Image (cartoon, helix red, strand yellow):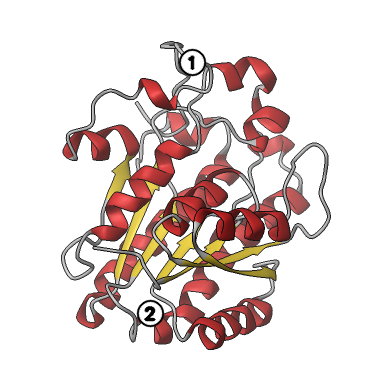
Amino acid sequence: MSFHNKTAFITGASRGIGKAIALKLAAEGANIVIAAKSVEENPKLGGTIFSAAEEVEAAGGKALAIQLDIRDEAASKAAIEKAAAHFGGIDILINNASAINLTPTEKTEPKRYDLMHSINVRGTFFLCQAAIPFLAKGTNPHILNLSPPISMKPKWFAGHLAYTMSKFNMSMIAYGLAAELKPQGIAANALWPKTTIATAAVNNLLGGEMLMKMSRTPEILADCAWYILRRPSATCTGNFFLDEDLLAEEGITDLSGYAYVPGNTNFYRDLFVD
């Protein structure tokens, strides 16, 4: 299934995983809506909605850069409507934007709790809500959340309860919408990596250069998203995909090309993956 002239609305697409997915789809001539906050480059993070738009167009796609803070549901609704008007509809919604703070309960500040839940949960929910009428008119419409399989193992809650709640809620949104939107033929799935991914968040917030060296590149998730979004939306829905398992389904078992450090085989397991 070709992505030529299909429209994908991607949050957090100015860098990292979101941008990697954008470029993967753009290579097939997709229309990419780059929805993110960054309009001025932060040296620690790199990339803006405008630089990402230039890369999308250089890759072969058409780009629309929209500055968006998904905590503002009115702005999200307006962004969806602007994107649909600009490209004539929306076929794909990828909820990639997320906030992370790995602290135990006693050390979780209210502002950090609110940030994670207003972006990861509330923002994702109301962006989906705004997109549904347009997805219903789309071609092979998909919602894809970058969130983990839901697990009730205590170890995933013990060290960072607030973050775990927010990410599992993103997955619940995908799971719930899969059932709710099935009559309309709109798919909703979740995708998560088995290893850490070399992004600004890993470098700046989690483990620095040492963890980066034990990570894979964002392209592994971009390739996975490509495979998921090609599948029929009427039947490929309600799944919690893990990158390695999905690629194995597609006959891809040599993942050496995704190593951030070429030749590395010692990868760090991501959260929520046994």
Q: Please name the residue shown 44% across and 11% down the image.
A: 263
Q: Quadrant of the N terminus?
A: bottom left
Label 1 amino acid? Pro
Dot 1 crowding, Cα within 10 Å, few <14, some 14–19, many 20+? few
Camera-side residue of 272 and 14: 14
Camera-side residue of 123 and 20: 20
Q: Relative to 60, is 140 above or below?
A: below
Classify residue 209 as left or right of residue 165.
right
* Res. 269 image quadrant: top left
Q: Please name the residue shown 60% across and 19% down the image.
A: 211
Q: Which residue is mark 1?
A: 262
Sequence-earlier tag: 2 or 1? 2
Q: Relative to 248, is 23 above or below?
A: below
Whole-percent x and y of residue 143?
Answer: 38, 65
Tell me, yes or no, if residue 245 can be seen here.
yes
Q: Helix, strand or loop at disc 2?
A: helix
Label 2 amino acid? Leu
Whole-percent x and y of residue 109?
Answer: 76, 45
Q: Helix, strand or loop at disc 1?
A: loop
Q: Relative to 272, is 210 above or below?
A: above
Mark drawn on residue 22: none
Mark drawn on residue 135: 2
Q: Quadrant of the C terminus?
A: top left
Whole-percent x and y of residue 70?
Answer: 64, 67
Classify residue 229 as left or right of residue 78.
left
Camera-side residue of 3 and 106: 3
Q: Relative to 59, is 182 above or below?
A: below
